[in-house]
Amino acid sequence: MTDKEVLQLLREVKHPGKGSKDIVELDMVNNIEVLADKTVVTLAFGKKRDPLAEYLIGATRATLIRHGLPSPEVRTIVLEDERPANKPLELGKDMISSIKHIIGIASGKGGVGKSTVAVNLAVALARSGFKVGLADADVYGPSIPTMTGTEGALPMAELVDGKEEIIPIEKYGVKWMSIGYFAKRKQALIWRGPMASTALKQLVLQVNWGPLDFLLVDMPPGTGDIHLSLTQEIGIESVIVVTTPQNVALADVEKCVSMFRNESINRPILGIVENMAWFTPAEHPDEKYYIFGREGGAQMAESLDVELLAQIPLVQSIRESGDAGEPLALGSGPDAAAFLNLAGLVAEKTSIK
């Protein structure tokens, strides 16, 4: 494949902050090298480093992989900038200085409803009168846009005192930010750990959150360097762990709690939320079927010496509300009440009245 053919492929990479113009149209492709064993693309950024730089780097690499280019590598240069191109982007904490509490929502494994709990807890806290934001740091499976009905929304960037700031999406009384707003639908984000960590830091530290009582961070499932980066560099002060009752999920909870209790991280666990604790048919609201096991989360909380904050039932309305983009916590039924009770416990444990 020739350099010109690669250049045409790169027209698929759109810049979300520039009216969806592509990186070729914006003259950001500085150089292309198609070698026998690898393909190198160099992207050029202006004086002020683009706040979506890591997203553009990842999207460029993903495009090259999708079209079968050998060993794609994306390099960057910063035009007319005294800072060396290979120096990491420096992000201060000005944007989070007015946030009282930053709480991570974590899980030992995927598929336990962590994002569902995060979204509904955020809405419940907002309904309780608190100022709330949620950062979707689940970079490999961002679901917040779908669950909040904000798919297609495009956060804008503005220049304030010479610095780029990203404006979060606001809905249901909550400020939302997700990497999903900047990726195409069904697009896989092919990022290595350090690149993902940097992009996620940008999605928190370059966002103009304003004063908040709570910023919830929906973390990726499992344990890894992204969790370490988010906890230490963003300043997550405590963690809520979400699990389901079955043994395979509970085994990973122990690893998750152990990670946050490790002396290199050392963050308190506010408690455990047992999701899908039982199944209740809509036609028989008083019946409970423990299809994933009974009291597994409660027993794990006791063995780990942490509080069981809530047991959330598996009901059809939770799934339907998530798919429809209308969080269940907006309602008035017993399921919404469970999340409002959870919000009250979180506020109590963080001493916010």
Image: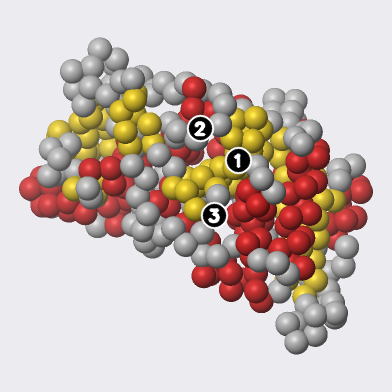
Which label number is shown at residue 172? Answer: 3
Residue at the spot of label 2: 210
Label 3 vs 2, first from the N-terminus: 3
Sequence-earlier tag: 3 or 1: 1
Amino acid type for the residue under numbered disc 1: Lys
Find numbered disc 3 in the image and state the secondary structure of the residue it sits on. loop
Q: Pointers 1 and 2 in contact (CB under 8 A)?
A: yes
Q: Is residue 263 left or right of residue 60?
A: right
Rendered image: mark on residue 131: 1
- Rounded to the nearest whole Å, what is the CA distance between mark 3 and mark 2? 17 Å
Q: Residue at x 69, y 49 (%)?
A: 128
Side of 291 where 82 appears, left or right: left
At x 43%, y 52%, the residue is 180
Quadrant for residue 214, please give it: top right
Q: Nearer the viewer, residue 150 or 186?
A: 150
Which label belongs to residue 250? none
- Camera sees residue 257: no
Q: Is residue 151 above or below residue 241?
A: below
Element under label 1? loop
The answer to whether residue 116 is left or right of residue 72 is right
**Residue 35, position as x, y percentages in the image:** 18, 41
In the image, what residue type sits under mark 3?
Tyr
Which residue is situated farthest in the top direction here? Answer: 82
Q: Earlier in the sequence, mark 1 or mark 2?
A: 1
Q: What residue appears at the point 76 percent right and 52 percent down from the top-left corner?
A: 342
Q: Residue furthest bottom?
A: 283
Q: Secondary structure at mark 2?
A: loop
Label 2 Cα neighbours within 10 Å, binned few <14 / some 14-19 / many ≥20: some
